[in-house]
Image: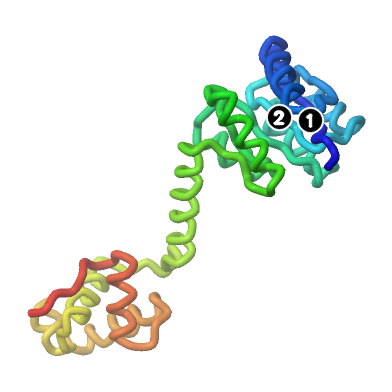
């Protein structure tokens, strides 16, 4: 198997030298070193490395912008951020920019080696604490995708009606409890079904409970 060819991009020369020594000890070829993002882009174009280990905070062109530029011309080159920043914004911007991984500089040498070995097997290298943030954000986006669009949000009165019909109330009972006419209840029910994109009251009740629009129904 060919040796992995790595480009290091970090504005601290001592840190780059330390990582380079570690990589060479693992029989990884360090093909170049860059002190800022612009230099990283130029060296990546000239050297075409398999992997770029990229810091985020660098003078001039930062690591995120450098990642976007490299990925635009060398999509096959893998980029892993190696940084002190554990900010969610940096993490998600790096992923959007095309980075395959995100590692924190405070990890141990053995953890770093395991992450690189995983990268060779196709596993995205990411620090455990940050992986949890990615999963939580993914879960939030999934919930958001399944939620009614903003223009389809239920009004407070529609939520009142929905909660009552979810608990088995008839339109007449809803009208009596909310002190409105049955005609108005019918109007609200029609709007609720349309906004939730469901066919009947049972589906509306199930979706309302599932998505937290109302609390769990209980037996009366």
Q: Quadrant of residue 14?
A: top right
Q: Which residue occupies the foreground of this view, 150 or 214?
A: 214
Q: Viewer-nearest of labels 1 and 2? A: 1
Q: Which residue shows up at 80% across the image and 46% down it?
A: 75
Q: Quadrant of residue 36?
A: top right
Is residue 97 visible to us here? no
Q: Which residue shows up at 84% across the image and 34% down it?
A: 49
Question: How far across and down, in percent of the image, does residue 85 sit?
Answer: 54, 26
N-terminal of the two: label 1 or label 2? 1
Neighbourhood count class around disc 2 (C-alpha, 10 Å): few under 14, some 14–19, many 20 upward? many
How much space separates mark 1 and mark 2, taking CA atoms? 7 Å
Question: How far across and down, in percent of the image, does residue 170 sit?
Answer: 16, 89
Q: Which mark is residue 136?
A: none
Q: Is residue 104 above or below residue 2?
A: above
Question: Do the CB atoms of the residues marked 1 and 2 lie less than 8 Å apart?
Answer: yes
Q: Which mark is residue 6?
A: 1
Q: Quadrant of residue 18?
A: top right
> Which secondary structure lies at badge 2?
strand
Q: Which residue shows up at 67% across the image and 14% down it?
A: 15
Quadrant holding the N terminus:
top right
Q: Report the coloring of the rendering.
A: rainbow
Question: How far across and down, in percent of the image, does residue 155 sit?
Answer: 30, 68
Q: Is residue 87 above or below residue 215?
A: above
> Which secondary structure lies at badge 1?
strand
Quadrant holding the C terminus:
bottom left
Q: Is residue 172 above or below residue 100?
A: below
Q: Which mark is residue 53?
A: 2
Neighbourhood count class around disc 1 (C-alpha, 10 Å): few under 14, some 14–19, many 20 upward? many
Question: Is 171 left or right of 68, judged from the image as shown?
Answer: left
């Amino acid at each position: 198997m060919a040796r992995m060819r790595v480009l290091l991009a970090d504005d601290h020369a001592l840190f780059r030298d330390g990582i380079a020594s570690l990589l060479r000890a693992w029989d990884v070829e360090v093909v170049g070193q860059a002190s800022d993002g612009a230099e990283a882009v130029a060296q990546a174009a000239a050297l075409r490395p398999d992997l770029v280990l990229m810091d985020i905070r660098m003078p001039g062109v930062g690591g995120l912008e450098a990642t976007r530029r490299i990925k635009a011309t060398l999509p096959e080159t893998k980029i892993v951020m190696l940084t002190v920043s554990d900010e969610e914004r940096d993490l998600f911007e790096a992923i959007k920019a095309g980075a395959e991984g995100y590692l924190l500089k405070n990890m141990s040498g053995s953890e770093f080696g395991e992450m690189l070995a995983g990268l060779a097997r196709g596993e995205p290298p990411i620090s455990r604490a940050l992986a949890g943030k990615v999963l939580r954000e993914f879960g939030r986006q999934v919930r958001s995708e399944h939620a009614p669009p903003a223009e389809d949000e239920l009004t407070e009165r529609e939520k009142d009606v929905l909660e009552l019909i979810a608990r088995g109330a008839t339109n007449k009972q809803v009208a009596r409890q909310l002190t409105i006419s049955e005609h108005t209840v019918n109007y609200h029910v029609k709007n609720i079904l349309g906004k939730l994109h469901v066919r009947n009251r049972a589906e509306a009740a199930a979706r309302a409970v599932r998505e937290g629009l109302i609390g769990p129904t209980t037996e009366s």
